[in-house]
Image (spheres, helix red, strand yellow):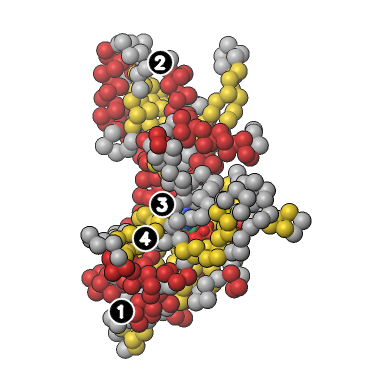
Amino acid sequence: MPNESQRMEKIVSLCKRRGFIFQAGEIYGGLNGVWDYGPLGVELKRNLKDYWWRVMVRERDDVVGLDGAILTHRAALKASGHEDTFSDPMVDCRTCKARLRADQLPDKNGVQQCPNCGGKDLTEARSFNLMLRTHLGASEDESSLAYLRPETAQSIFQQFKNVLDTSRKKLPFGIAQIGKAFRNEINPRNYIFRSREFEQMELEYFCRPEQGAELLEYWKEERLKFYQNIGLPNEKLHVLSVPEADRAFYSKGTYDIEFDFPFGRQELEGVAYRTDYDLAQHQNASGKPLDYFDEETKQRFIPHVIEPSAGVDRTVLALICEAYDEETITDEKGKSETRIVMRFHPRIAPIKVGVFPLLKNNEQLVAKAREVQALLRPHMNVFYDESGAIGRRYRRQDEAGTPFGVTIDFESLGERDDSLLDTVTLRHRDSMQQERVAIRELLARLQHELA
Ligand code: ATP
């Protein structure tokens, strides 16, 4: 296996070659820190988001969803503290003019230096606000200023009362959202890990103040289970309890869930106990009540909140890094070759099954393969491929991470043995084992494996 930086290079190159991820604006020289997801990447990302929505919203009685706007009222981000404090410390290198994050500078013998040119002539750190600004309407002045949201959470807090009144939920309950967020990161880096446009999957779980500490532990455990259920191994997942000095002043506890990426251990998700800070801030700034009335105790109070906040793109990167594998295989003739295989969990694999007629110029094989494709297609992402030798077609799907391959051969037509009529070969990506399955059992069999 290659070392970790070679491994990362190979992953980046496979992602481009196979259509997982492309640099945005590539034909114009690229837009730094912005990425486009290709045909395989978009499926992978969608499967991840769908699974999150399934377990966080649909399979629970106590969580409802929201899809808030990206354009955000300036007053909301003033109230939340983002306008004044959502910034990173920045320095300039006077030698090469690079703009750098002051808290991420390498240090040589106690002296901080520029990671680009090694220069030590750096300016004093000053704070740089990460929010992206825009103007609504025709006039470009302070009165029309709005922001592209830096996190999805703030629309959840602003809509708390509307959701409460319409969903008639009782505490504890949560509001979940998946969507784009924007941060003008000083140094986007590590591929899609730190970008300027990204997606978040966030839950704001509201509760009574006395339930907060316990629910923080509960959500940390739930979120760890989630990552295991999409195929990230337990030994590469770590929980960092963020020390009080590094937490937001209002937080009563924060865990970072970290993953061992090829470039080091880094945050996938933060699970934070944010107390009543956000709702109280918006209530004070807007003058509109954002409290909760408990009918049993007749108390009125502002709920506390636990926030598991995950990055879609970071999780996609973790899934890709974990899936990438190379192995040497030897065929029947004793010839060895390297097989590149993306070992995605079937649940999140971009394509679930490849359907292959053994020969493309045999009408009956092609017709039956098309029948199998039509049978499976309403239920899962199917890739039909009739070109090239069957071994080559399998390899292409191995690289795409497709967990199953279905081949329609002469046995499927009942040509050699009547009892094999309408059966196909089912090939398993990881073991490369093949078995014979009746077409009428195929859908149930695959659905079971993909659940
Ligand atoms: P970091 O310290 O890495 O900048 P953060 O602590 O500022 O992250 P949060 O504000 O807690 O991040 O955001 C929640 C999640 O959103 C993060 O755990 C991460 O998965 C994702 N996220 C935040 N910033 C970015 C980014 N620039 N690119 C991709 N994902 C991001």
Residue 403 to residue 183: above or below: above
**Residue that label 1 marks:** 286
Residue 212 spot, x, y in % from top left = 47, 75
Residue 25 visible, this orientation: yes
Q: Amino acid at mark 1?
A: Ser
**Residue that label 2 marks:** 388
* Element type where label 4 sits in the image: strand
* Element type where label 3 sits in the image: strand
Query: From mark 1 to mark 2, how far is it between C-alphas?
Result: 64 Å
Task: Give the mark, 3 or 1, whose residue is nearer the N terminus.
Answer: 3
Task: Give the mark, 1 or 4, whose residue is nearer the N terminus.
Answer: 4
Residue 135 spot, x, y in % from top left = 29, 61
Discs 3, 2 touching: Cβ within 8 Å: no
- Residue at the spot 61% in from the left edge and 57% down from the top edge: 104
**Residue that label 3 marks:** 197
Quarter of the image for residue 209 reads bottom left
Query: From mark 3 to mark 2, how far is it between C-alphas?
Result: 39 Å
Task: Give the mark, 3 or 2, whose residue is nearer the N terminus.
Answer: 3
Mark nearer the viewer, 2 or 4 = 4
Residue extending farthest to the bottom is 298
Q: Amino acid at mark 3?
A: Glu
Identify the image quadrant of the C terminus: top left
Mark nearer the viewer, 3 or 2 = 3
* Element type where label 2 sits in the image: loop
